[in-house]
């Protein structure tokens, strides 16, 4: 029990620090749990040992429409229209039970991700190219909007900050090295035979120049992250397939280390000290309500002294963490 490895052991450690079981700690169990939550939140927000750098891989999702039957096969890329709702979308893929789509439009040809403006239960869905039809299912969750129509990516609760996304190459801008007809591919093809015979300085300078041109004419894709929504907004051209369903996005982020998975977190000296002080302050706050009341024998409760001592301890711990153990503010984007 000297080295806490669970939440309960941390709680008992802090209470023993305050005098339990020799003296009674006048703090209700729910109050203790609240103070532990408060301590963990501070630790995770400000101490670099509570977070880790994380490369989050996310598979872009398309929107989905459930169908109960279909005649023929929809063509990828064709536009489908609802016979009743007059909503439309572009097919990404389809099978006998689900149509995966993107670029959703309501009956007024306005892009939105409002379910009430989308396809209706039981209506006929028609493809404008193939002529195929399908009947929309009768389901409370008939339509589920994906990343492309939402225009944001939902991240895990554990992610507290986003630094950047790795470059999204423009497949139509001639910047990818995998496109046979791109300038970058041809440059690599022409330069590669000379790399073994000449210095790499010219190659390095040329690559830097290409990167400069890319930064000037393509630029970095702006991002916005709000931790309380867990949404990463990408200011890209979703309509022209900067990102398509089933493609992958790599996010450079910071995430919280889960103390239940990495139990050594509960034994961090700052966390133990901070939670102890928080419980002590709660103890003092509880006793202040009885300040001036004499107990049998003429003794009085001095809750204010406990409260003020705890406040001083909390300020010192927060200052020490801020000065020595907090990540620089420009490392992360968010929480917004």
Image: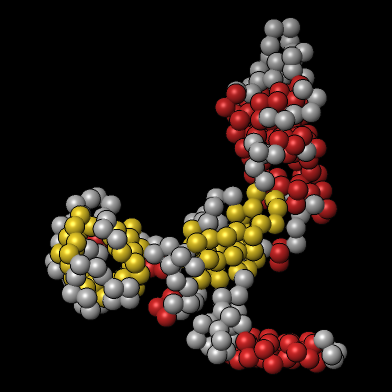
Q: Is residue 306 above or below residue 105?
A: above
| Left or right of 140 on screen, residue 303 | right
In the picture, the quarter occupied by the N terminus is top right
Residue drawn at x 70%, y 57% is 53
Viewer-side residue, 76 vs 333: 76
- Corner quadrant of residue 309: top right
Note whether residue 226 is visible. no
Q: Is residue 106 above or below residue 116?
A: below
Q: How many marks?
A: 0
The spot of residue 254 in percent (x, y) is 66, 57
Point out the residue furthest to the top here: 297
The spot of residue 273 in percent (x, y) is 78, 35
In the picture, the quarter occupied by the C terminus is bottom right
Q: Is residue 281 above or below residue 187?
A: above
The spot of residue 20 in percent (x, y) is 74, 17
Residue drawn at x 51%, y 71% is 234
Residue drawn at x 14%, y 68% is 83
The spot of residue 236 in percent (x, y) is 49, 77
Residue drawn at x 55%, y 66% is 249
Viewer-side residue, 294 vs 165: 165
| Left or right of 104 on screen, residue 212 | right
Q: Is residue 262 above or below residue 199?
A: above
Q: Name the colour scheme.
A: secondary structure
Note whether residue 69 is visible. yes
Viewer-side residue, 44 vs 98: 98
């Amino acid at each position: 029990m000297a080295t806490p490895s669970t939440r309960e052991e941390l709680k008992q450690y802090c209470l023993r620090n305050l005098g339990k079981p020799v003296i009674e700690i006048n703090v209700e169990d729910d109050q203790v749990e609240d103070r532990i939550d408060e301590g963990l939140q501070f630790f995770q927000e400000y101490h670099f040992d509570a977070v880790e750098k994380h490369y989050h891989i996310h598979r872009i999702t398309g929107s989905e429409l459930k169908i109960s039957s279909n005649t023929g096969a929809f063509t990828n890329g064709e536009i489908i229209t609802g016979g009743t709702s007059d909503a439309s979308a572009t097919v990404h893929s389809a099978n006998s039970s689900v149509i995966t789509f993107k670029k959703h439009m309501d009956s007024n040809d306005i892009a939105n991700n409002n379910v009430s403006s989308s396809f209706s239960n039981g209506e006929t869905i028609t493809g404008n190219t193939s002529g195929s039809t399908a009947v929309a299912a009768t389901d409370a969750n008939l339509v589920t909007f994906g990343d492309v129509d939402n225009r944001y990516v939902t991240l895990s609760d554990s992610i507290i900050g986003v630094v950047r996304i790795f470059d999204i190459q423009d497949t139509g801008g001639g910047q990818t090295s995998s496109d046979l007809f791109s300038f970058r591919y041809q440059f690599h093809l022409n330069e590669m035979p000379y790399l073994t015979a000449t210095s790499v300085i010219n190659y390095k300078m040329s690559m830097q120049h290409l990167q400069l041109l890319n930064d000037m004419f393509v630029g970095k894709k702006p991002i916005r992250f709000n931790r309380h929504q867990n949404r990463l907004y990408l200011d890209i051209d979703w309509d022209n397939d900067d990102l398509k369903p089933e493609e992958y996005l790599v996010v450079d982020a910071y995430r919280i280390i889960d103390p239940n998975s990495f139990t050594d977190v509960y034994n961090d000296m700052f966390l133990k000290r901070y939670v102890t002080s928080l419980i002590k302050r709660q103890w003092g706050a509880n006793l202040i309500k009885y300040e001036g009341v004499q107990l049998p024998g003429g003794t009085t409760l001095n809750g204010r002294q406990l409260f003020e001592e705890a406040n001083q301890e909390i300020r010192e711990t927060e200052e020490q963490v801020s000065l020595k153990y907090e990540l620089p503010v420009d490392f992360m984007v968010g929480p917004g």
